[in-house]
Image (cartoon, rainbow, N blue to C red):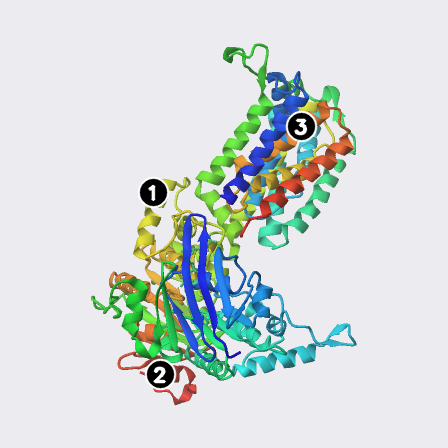
Amino acid sequence: MISQLRQAGTLIGLVLIVVFFTVQLPETFLTARNLINVSQQISMLAVVAFAMTVVMVMTDFDLSVGSMASLAGIVAAVLFTADQPVWLAVVAALAVGVLGGVVNGVLVAVLGILPFVATLGTLTIYSGAAFWISDGKTIFGRDIPKGFSEFARGGVSLDAVGFAGVSLPYMTILALVVLAVVWVTLEHTTYGRRLYAIGGNAEAARLAGVRVRWLRLSAFAITGLGAAVAGLMYASRVASANPTQGAGLMLDAIAAVFLGMTMGKEGEPRALATLVGVLILGILDNGLTQMKVDSYVREMLVGTIVIAAVATSSIGRRA
Amino acid sequence: MAEPLEFSAMTKRYGAATVLSDVSLRLSPGRVHALMGENGAGKSTLIKLLAGVVPADSMLVRQGARTLPLRSAADAHAAGFRVIHQELNIVPQLSVAENILLGQPIPQRFGLLVHWAELARRARAALAELGVSHMDVRRQAGGLGTGDRMLVKIAAALVQDAGQTACLYVLDEPTAALNGAEAEKLFAVIGRLKQQGAAILYVSHRMAEVMDICDDVTVLRNGRHILTTEIAQTSRDQIIHAMTGRDVADAYPPRRTPLGDAVVCAAEGVSTARLTGLTFTLRQGEILGVAGLAGAGQGDVLSLFLGSVRPTAGKAVLSGGVLPTSPAQAWARGVAHVPQERRSEGLMMRMGVRANALLPHLTGVIARKGPERRRVADLSAAVNLKAAGPEQSLWQLSGGNQQKVMFARAMAGQPKLLLLGEPTRGIDVGARFEIYKLIRALADGGCGVLLSSTDLPELLGLCDRILVLQAGRQATILSPDGMAPADLLGALQAAPLALETT
Ligand SMILES: Nc1ncnc2c1ncn2[C@@H]1O[C@H](COP(=O)(O)OP(=O)(O)OP(=O)(O)O)[C@@H](O)[C@H]1O
Ligand SMILES: [Mg+2]
């Protein structure tokens, strides 16, 4: 009973937040346009958070996702500058993400370095690489091809379902696709089940025939790929690439997964629960901005809410 | 200290399940009281209540005219209760000495530095009380085997008496991983505590020792009180009947098919880091026991064929091929394994029965819940599992039921070679013989079995031959025919050269 309440607590929190902003901002908050807007704003965070969930299922971390996202964006932009086609730049950026993830995976799974330390190191390395490749400059303007930057502006029109003049952004759709892929992978494949087993007890999993090294390595690669996707989305959205633009994603993504973990039966991360975490963070940001709350105050509020949610969920656990 | 302790109206509910229902218990000074019951009957729950580590829904504790408040572990300690819980909680990073003196004021030098020599001296003294001298108290406790860990916990409970006297000692399955020799030492200590006038509450699934060392017995079934009597007034069969509500056939199932000719696995002159001179062949359908005192190297015999330990010398084969180089390979080649240390090496405590039981048997890309649930339901029935359902988390199961999940995992995949490390640890009498039947059925089907156990009657009852290890060396291979547990214990302890090889 208590545990059900605790599990539902975070979801109730989300509903309360929505109700609060609906009352405070009756004109603007609960409108199709604003919600669509929120979904687009949070789409990059969502992709990183879903990717982060994959490693956090094994109780690992990836602190390098933010700088990996920046690096991927920069790699694409540099290729654009060299007049390469869009597809090539995109593939190269994704490959950089996978490669970065594999490096993390080798450090953690093969060399046995703690994920916190290993990815803290690669965070700096990837961020340095992004600066180095871009000469520390923002790449933008005419260098970014229209075909690439229009992705972030385009969408599927919702006229047919009764929302005249509103369209569902491609960014949102992409985030939903990533969610679906991560959800299926974690919940419905033997691969995902093994990742959870590693998180449950890595030594026991190994002795039960799970290829722990290989799985951890591949999971980090998936997270790297997710970070690169988010980096490309960001670059497309602002039609530019800057070596620090992904920096804020990492902490928010981890916070979102933690918020989601409060909903797990045993406090484990789940893809759909991470979505709730992302929505809480995204809606708070949107609503507070509309209410013209100072951004520093906003940050303090968000931090407090994350701690409060995690704290209340650990009360009553294991009673 | 002369007054008995009376516990009454002990009730505990978890959600909708009542796991302890209005149980009373009277513990007299100078007597050893056995608490018996099937796996999940509520023994450990009762102990957690009286130790103050889990809040009771109701409980009344009186000592003579006094009512004792028991709301926390500190209350229980102040009341003079010393409890050794079923789950072993040692701190693996700390030394053996620190673990033994945990919770005691640390001896200091200049009021500032830890007085290591004094710490070690006190820890050694505590172990010496138990007659244990083989342990280096300065080493990290994480490297200890289960038996040694239990000895450390027992020593820790004894040492806490500095200054203040204890009136009740509670031991929840202390012998589950101890071999005969270590258990004897523990019984001697229990005898001394009894002499000193302490009451002792004792839980064990080993019937023989209960009949030997206990004075009274209380039996629980499904959280209810069934019977309290003096051991002298009852019998083994009556206790088992009270526990299970039925008559349990406790005969070891005999072999029904002759041994096959094919060799399942073999070793010749194999050494590992902790073992030398391993030489044997295991034929299809054969059950080979692996026996030794604590730390004699039993674990490595199993690990060798699981691919988690590499041989440093000699030659070993698995079904005609080379040894597996990883557990993943081993499972894929039809090896199944019940690890000696179920908590650290076997179970994912925060995951469900289904995830735990089927982990090595996941195949294909898509995991399908429906068929998995049905499979787990069948397995659960086969091993007599008492759980709320296939998704109940393992930490919520009783110790014996966790062990049954381990066994279910090993038997699920129709193994060709079964590596069993203490397979029936903590499993109740009734279920134990069900498990023996399952092992026998697998063997009759041609599966080879390596059975490492500290339960000597189990080794003698099930095995075709018993490989004896002494301090990391293979001493001999015995035939169990006509042997009594005491003979086998003698063989484990004897000097290697004095042994006849059969
Ligand atoms: N935290 C919990 N939540 C739900 N059920 C629990 C919890 N802890 C114990 N139980 C249930 O209570 C029952 C009694 O468990 P307990 O550990 O007392 O059994 P036991 O008699 O010690 O058995 P064993 O011989 O296997 O050690 C079991 O059915 C167990 O599943
Ligand atoms: Mg128990």
Mark 1 falls on what kind of element? helix
Are labels 3 and 2 on one chain?
no
- Where is residue A31? Give x, y as percent: 61, 17
Q: Nearer the viewer, residue B232 or A103?
A: B232
Q: Position of residue A232 (x, y in %)?
A: 64, 29
Label 1 vs label 2, nearer the camera? 2
Q: Nearer the viewer, mark 3 or mark 2?
A: 2
Question: Mark 2 — on which chain does it sit?
Answer: B
The residue depicted at 73 percent of the width and 75 percent of the height is B108
Three-letter amino acid code at the position of disc 2: Ala
Which is more N-terminal, label 2 or label 1? 1
Badge 2: residue crowd in 10 Å (few <14, some 14–19, many ≥20):
few
- In space, the residues marked 1 and 3 are separated at their CA atoms by 43 Å
The circle on residue B371 is 1
- Tell me if residue B259 comes above or below residue A263 in the rendering: below
Q: CA distance from mark 1 to mark 2?
A: 47 Å
- The chain ID associated with circle 1 is B
Query: In the figure, residue B409 lies in which quadrant?
Result: bottom left
Residue B85: percent from the left, percent from the top? 50, 66
The three-letter amino acid code for the residue at tag 3 is Tyr
Q: Is residue B293 left or right of residue B450?
A: right
Q: Which residue is mark 3?
A: A234
Residue annotated with mark 2: B486
Secondary structure, mark 2, is helix
Q: Say if A27 sits above or below B302 in the image.
A: above
Residue at mark 3: chain? A
Count residues near mark 1 (Cα–Cα under 10 Å), then give few for <14, some for 14-19, many for 20+: few
Q: Residue at x 64, y 39 (%)?
A: A255
Label 1 CB, ligand 1: below 8 Å?
no
How many numbered callouts?
A: 3
